[in-house]
Image: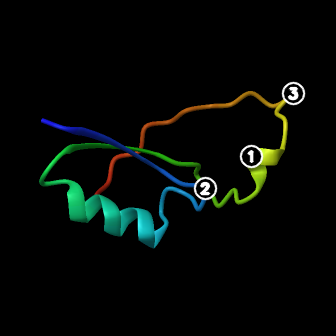
Amino acid sequence: MMRILLTNDDGIRAKGLSALYEAIKEIAEVIVVAPETEQSAVGHAITLFDPLRVQEVKNNG
């Protein structure tokens, strides 16, 4: 089975991310990696003092 990684900077609960996941989940194993909240333009920042943390979120929908 094909594996697809979905990511964005609009946050894990973004409607577009959810819609894309729903559209392709039947044809592939889908893994979503996204920030907890909207982070547009944060890619221009440097993280020096705050550690990056990862937390698994289960979709209840």
Q: Determine which residue is flagged by label 3.
A: 48
Q: Which of marks 3 and 1 is in front?
A: 1
The amino acid type, in three-letter code, at marker 2 is Asp
Judge left or right: residue 43 versus residue 11: right
Residue 44: x %, y % from top left: 82, 46
Q: Is mark 2 on a helix, strand or loop?
A: loop
Q: Nearer the viewer, residue 3 or 34?
A: 3
Residue 15 drawn above or below residue 49: below
**Tags 2 and 1 touching, CB below 8 Å:** yes
Q: In which quarter of the image is residue 24?
A: bottom left
Left of 23 or right of it: where is 16?
right
Which residue, given by chain and number where applicable, does mark 1 sit on?
43
Task: Mark yes or no: residue 53 visible.
Answer: yes
Callout in the foreground (2, 3): 2
Mark yes or no: residue 61 visible: no
Marked residue nearer the N-terminal end (3 or 1)? 1
Quarter location, residue 23: bottom left
Of 14 and 2, which appears nearest the observer? 2
Residue under label 2: 9
